[in-house]
DNA sequence: GGCCAGGTGTGTT
DNA sequence: AACACACATGGC
């Protein structure tokens, strides 16, 4: 039994923390000098890339660090997943450009709500909306002395109670009624997010897309980023661009056809391949890692 | 100032 | 099944 502590080090190789936390999966990580701060569940966390892997410190002492190991997926076998990718030039290039990029394992409600808010929004704006939502409706969490206040992501029950006009004040525009109704149904147990990990991908998609504001893309984000469905393959404008340029440079391919191509081409860890394509494309377009933003 | 953003809902062919 | 359009808001 480990002693309670506010510090822990995870031994892990081939893990690029910056790429992972800044690759459009999660929206609450802030970069500072040499470290990243954020909220995971009800805990404030600072993460730093170290010699042996990843160093973490928290706002309150922790005895069992499995929640963070799980979130960061430090035990995932990255090499095996990379080896499962199709052996073609586009994937070789994407892997070479994104060494150590990982998929996180996020809370399903936070992930669902975040991606309902993501449609036709830039990542910087998604981050702003979510930040405001957490400040207004999230529970305060313990932070180290001298740190700014931190807030958990608001529960579904909490957001279900917020009037639509107030949600619109957080600048989410037409997404406000979608978020509110999705929150109500999740809080009422009409959709059970925890069950989505244990049913087939198609059944899970059908369940999620019953919710307003949730189509194929948002559903696959939730299934990939928080339910561990390894072949979920969200196709957004960036992935569409990547697939178009890298696999079909000569002819235009429609979105539904592109989804069908993706469903057969990328193998048992297609979702991971998707994240490499997404990050590769955004990086080469110069939208990632630029100071100032 | 126009184009675009980790899309979805609704209505038409 | 495949398209067209509206939908808020803000970065560039």
Image: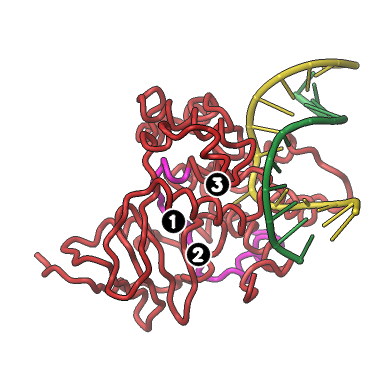
Chain colours: A red, B yellow, C green
- Could you tell which of marks 3 and 2 lies nearer the N-terminus? 2
Q: Secondary structure at mark 2?
A: helix
Viewer-proximal residue among A238 and A75: A238
Looking at the image, residue A124 sits to the left or right of residue A34; the answer is: right
Q: Residue at x 79, y 38 (%)?
A: A254
Q: Position of residue A261 (x, y in %)?
A: 70, 41
Viewer-proximal residue among A213 and C9: C9
Q: Position of residue A85 (x, y in %)?
A: 58, 55
* Mark in front: 3 vs 2: 3
Can residue A120 be found in the magenta stretch? no
Viewer-proximal residue among A285 and A273: A285
Q: Chain of mark 1?
A: A
Asked whether the beta carbons under mark 2 and mark 1 sit within 8 Å of each other, the answer is yes
- Range of the magenta residues? A87-111
> Label 3, on which residue?
A170
* Mark in front: 3 vs 1: 3
Asked whether the beta carbons under mark 3 and mark 2 sit within 8 Å of each other, the answer is no
- The disc at residue A104 is 1
């Amino acid at each position: 039994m480990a002693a309670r502590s506010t510090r822990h080090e995870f031994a892990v190789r081939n893990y690029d923390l910056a790429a992972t936390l800044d690759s459009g999966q999660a929206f609450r990580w802030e970069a500072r000098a040499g470290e990243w701060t954020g909220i995971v569940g009800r805990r404030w966390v600072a993460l730093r890339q170290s010699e042996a892997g990843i160093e973490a410190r928290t706002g309150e002492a922790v005895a069992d660090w499995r929640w963070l190991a799980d979130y960061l997926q430090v035990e995932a076998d990255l090499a095996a997943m990379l080896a499962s990718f199709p052996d073609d030039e586009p994937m070789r290039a994407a892997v070479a450009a994104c060494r150590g990029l990982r998929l996180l394992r996020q809370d399903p409600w936070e992930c669902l709500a975040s991606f309902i808010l993501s449609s036709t929004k830039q990542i910087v704006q998604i981050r702003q909306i979510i930040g405001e939502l957490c400040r207004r409706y999230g529970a305060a969490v313990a932070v180290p002395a001298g740190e700014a206040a931190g807030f958990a992501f608001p529960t579904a029950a909490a957001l279900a109670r917020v009037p639509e006009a107030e949600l619109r004040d957080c600048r989410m525009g037409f997404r406000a009624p979608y978020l509110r109704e999705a929150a109500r149904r999740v809080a009422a147990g009409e959709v059970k997010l925890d069950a989505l990990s244990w049913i087939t991908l198609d059944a899970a998609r059908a369940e999620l897309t019953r919710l307003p504001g949730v189509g194929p893309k948002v559903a696959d984000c939730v299934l990939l980023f928080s339910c561990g469905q390894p072949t979920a393959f969200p196709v957004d404008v960036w992935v569409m661009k990547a697939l178009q340029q890298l696999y079909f440079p000569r002819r235009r391919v429609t979105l539904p056809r592109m989804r069908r191509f993706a469903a057969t081409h990328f193998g048992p860890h297609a979702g991971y391949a998707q994240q490499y394509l997404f990050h590769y494309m955004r990086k080469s377009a110069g939208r990632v890692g630029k100071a100032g933003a």
